[in-house]
Image (cartoon, grey):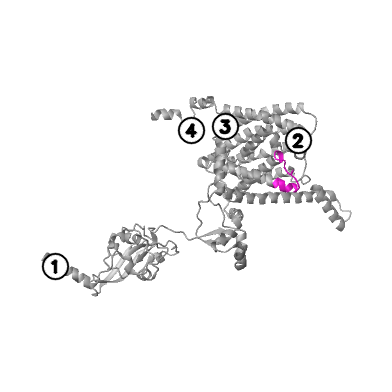
Amino acid sequence: MIGFGLIKGLSVTLRNLFGPVFTIQYPDKRVGVFGLAKNKNLSVLSLLKSYPREFLFALVGMAKVEVRIEQFPRFRGNEFVWYDDRCTACASCAKYCPLGIIEIVTHASGENLQAGENYAIDKFDIDTGRCMFCGLCVEACPYDALHMGTDFERGNYHRAKLVLDKETLISQDKNPSSWFRPQFEEKEYNPWDSDLGDYKEAGRHEKPSYEKIKQNWVNKRKFNG
Amino acid sequence: MFEFIYNILDAIIDIFIKDMRYESYIITAVTGLIIAFAVINGVLGGVLVLIWGERRLLGRFQQRTGPNRWGPQGLLTSVADAVKVMFKEDIVPEEADHYIFNLAPLLLVIPVFIIFSVIPFGISLYAVDINVSVLFILAITSISGLSIICAAWASANRIAIFSALRSVAMLISYEIPVGLSLVGILLITESMSVMDIVIYQSIPFILIQPVAAIVFFLGSLAEINRTPFDLTEAESELAAGYQNDYSGMKWGLFYLGEFAAAIAAATVFSTLFLGGPNGPILPGLFWLTIKVIAVLFFIIWIRASWPRFRIDQVLNLAWKGLFELTLVNIVVTSIAVIIWTDLDSNRLLYIGLVNWIFAFPFVLLIFKLLKTKKYQSDINSSSYYPVGSDSPKFKKEIK
């Protein structure tokens, strides 16, 4: 039938008109009265009582509602999570980095020699401004001290501010991504629900105690001899 | 409207100055200016809303949101755009013919506003009532072709010239079916005045002249360079067509002219075919606005749905399809008008019935003819293949 294709095309677009919108608005979206009431878990009338100003804005569709985009747990965000207590300053990450943007300066501390912690860290800088987030440093870390982060709102007007130094890495919120860290996925850990501040939870296994290491050493000798 | 404002001004002036010289001339001029100001600003406001509405609706048709950040529902987006366009640098190419280059945008915009002078916004709400206003509308709309070729020629740009040649070929082709499609209406109403046509429409003419309505609608789409006939600005082939070298407010005027032309086309269509300001209870301006919005919605809907024609397809449609349809329409309508000459209320019904009976077979026949193998073989046997079409020679080489 002639002209049927044209009507079919029109019907497809008409279905889109009344269908859902694919656009996700970020960082906030404009909502009407009902959207705002749903967002604040209030009925429309109580919204008018408690937030009259917002209600007026919502009447013309200008009320703002923050949008928090949930990423996948393996998402590689643009900061790194580094656990000071897990790091032995072996500089594997710095050696594996294809861009050479990790800078580590150490000196021999002479403490905890038996635990393998020979070095004290003076400087641990990651220049995220030049990072391509390949994650090779995270793969290289033998002690699970370095993790990919999950933050992505780190825009800046200065390149120098993109460099993550030791103090920042220690003090910042630690929400490591589960990228290349199967132990997080085993625990069903979600970076957007929980904060992983404790270094003991980040590793694949418990950090061995001095006694345990000594026992291992003795056992090895016994087997060989 | 004219007499109403004239009388008010006359009364006001009589209070302050008595025995003023050339009083009637001055009041006439001032009244004209007031009406022009009101109509032009109404259309400009309509354009701003239309730009917003089109972007918004296109977004929804394509499962996007469209502009919704600036102002309630993004309503001020087009205002921001207008301000931006005003502050942009105005560049004139070195080889351009400056006089014509500057004249072309005005030539596109001004005729569009002139059209609104003869359109009745209510049963007694019109600027002027000319007795040949249908002819006036047809004459004024064809000025846009001149503007396009002026713009292209003055900017000394081959892509612009291509676009303008296409556009003018299309405009000239579609003038004929558009003009002839109105002959049916003129035969029924026996008047060329838009006012008479509006008053005559106890039943909207789209129900009495379906073929004419389709042809007129498609033709007016072509004349305002809208999808599916927007070859003039085919972005993929011609960049922006004749607007290539324009920037700043001159480009803004082209943009304004296009959208104002869309409003004008919708208004003319709803006046001639949808009954214009006729409607129950509420004032005429309300009904006209509703009808114009409905037609504009349909135009935007078409833009979101249908692909663009090739230039040969467009001209084929005009000369082999719509032209014949209008001729058939004229013959059928004139026979019906001769048979039912007396002006009783059933006359329109009979004429409409005859038109509907003849509409379907002829529309189907002519569009079947357009699709025939003969047309296909014409293309296959010729040595010229339009860009983008599948050439049989090319296929053979692959085998």
Front one among A42 and B123: A42
Report the mark closest to the observer, 2 or 1: 1
Residue B334 occupies quadrant: top right
Residue at image point 86% right, 51% down? B21
Distance Cα–Cα, label 3 vs label 1: 90 Å
Q: Is residue B346 left or right of residue B381?
A: right
- The span picked out in magenta is B271-289
Mark 2 belongs to which subunit? B
Q: Is residue B66 left or right of residue B9?
A: left
Report the mark closest to the observer, 1 or 4: 1
Kindly identify which numbered label has been placed on residue B192.
Answer: 2
Query: Mark 1 belongs to which amino acid?
Result: Arg
Report the mark closest to the observer, 4 or 3: 3
Query: Mark 4 belongs to which amino acid?
Result: Ser
Front one among B215 and A161: B215
Mark with earlier residue (3, 1):
3
Quarter of the image that includes the C terminus of chain B = top left
Disc 3 to disc 1: CB gap under 8 Å? no
Q: Is residue A207 left or right of residue A43?
A: left
Residue B75 pos. (x, y %): 61, 55
Report the mark closest to the observer, 2 or 3: 3
Disc 2 to disc 4: CB gap under 8 Å? no
* Badge 2 and badge 4 in a common chain: yes
Mark 3 belongs to which subunit? A
Query: Mark 3 belongs to which amino acid?
Result: Ile
Residue A17 is a magenta residue: no
Determine the secondary structure under disc 4: loop
Determine the secondary structure under disc 1: helix
Distance Cα–Cα, label 2 vs label 3: 34 Å
Residue at image point 80% right, 30% down? B342
Distance Cα–Cα, label 4 vs label 3: 21 Å
Residue identified by numbered label 4: B389
